[in-house]
Amino acid sequence: MTKERDFGHICQKNTCHYCCVETEMLLTKKDVQRIVRSTLISPTEFAIRNEEGYLMLQNRHKANESQCFFLNEKGLCSIYQIRPEGCKFYPIIWNFEDHQAILDDYCPHCGEFALKLSSTSDNLENFIFRLFGKL
Ligand code: SF4
Ligand code: SF4
């Protein structure tokens, strides 16, 4: 877990798992190691490489939609405590054009995360640099 406040209650309150459908969430090597260590699931089951060669979460067909491998039948993340770092930041994302953290309006409840934006910005910047080697 990061030291940031956990805002998962906003998703729970809104019974939302929108961003866990057709997810394109990237994974760090540490994410993969942590998930394998904790679940004993092979990375070939939950991760794939995208066209740019980055590891990302794999979707599978459930409930008539393509959902993250780790979304359970109750619409909850089955690895919440050890979920990927990018999932912890979301819906805060990095805007590469303006070089700043922004709220992703793909999240239907992104406005409720406004408090998280300022407290998360520096940590997201570090994360993006670790992931891509650039900002
Ligand atoms: S789309 Fe937004 S509210 Fe819904 S689960 Fe994702 S972060 Fe939470
Ligand atoms: S790991 Fe959990 S929070 Fe992240 S996309 Fe999958 S189900 Fe959603």
Image: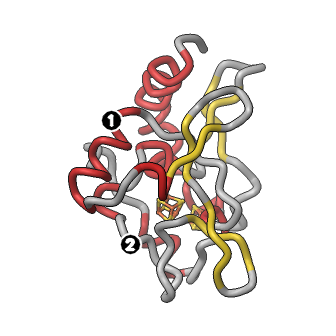
In the displayed structure, 4 sits above or below 8; it is above
Which element carries disc 2, helix, strand or loop? loop
Residue at x 38% of width, y 33% of height: 29
Among numbered discs 2 and 1, the one appearing first in the sequence: 1
Out of 84 and 32, give the one closest to the viewer: 32
Please provide percent x and percent y for residue 92.
58, 44
Please provide percent x and percent y for residue 30.
32, 35
Out of 22 and 37, give the one closest to the viewer: 37
Residue at x 73% of width, y 77% of height: 65
Residue 78: image tag: 2
> What is the three-letter code of the residue carrying label 2?
Ser
> What is the three-letter code of the residue carrying label 1?
Lys
User: Can you identify the residue that label 1 sits on?
Assistant: 30
In the displayed structure, 11 sits above or below 124; it is below
| Residue 8 falls left or right of residue 90 | left
Ligand 2: does it lie within 8 Å of the C-beta at label 2?
yes
Ligand 2: does it lie within 8 Å of the C-beta at label 1?
no
| Residue 112 falls left or right of residue 32 | right
| Quarter assignment of residue 16 | bottom right
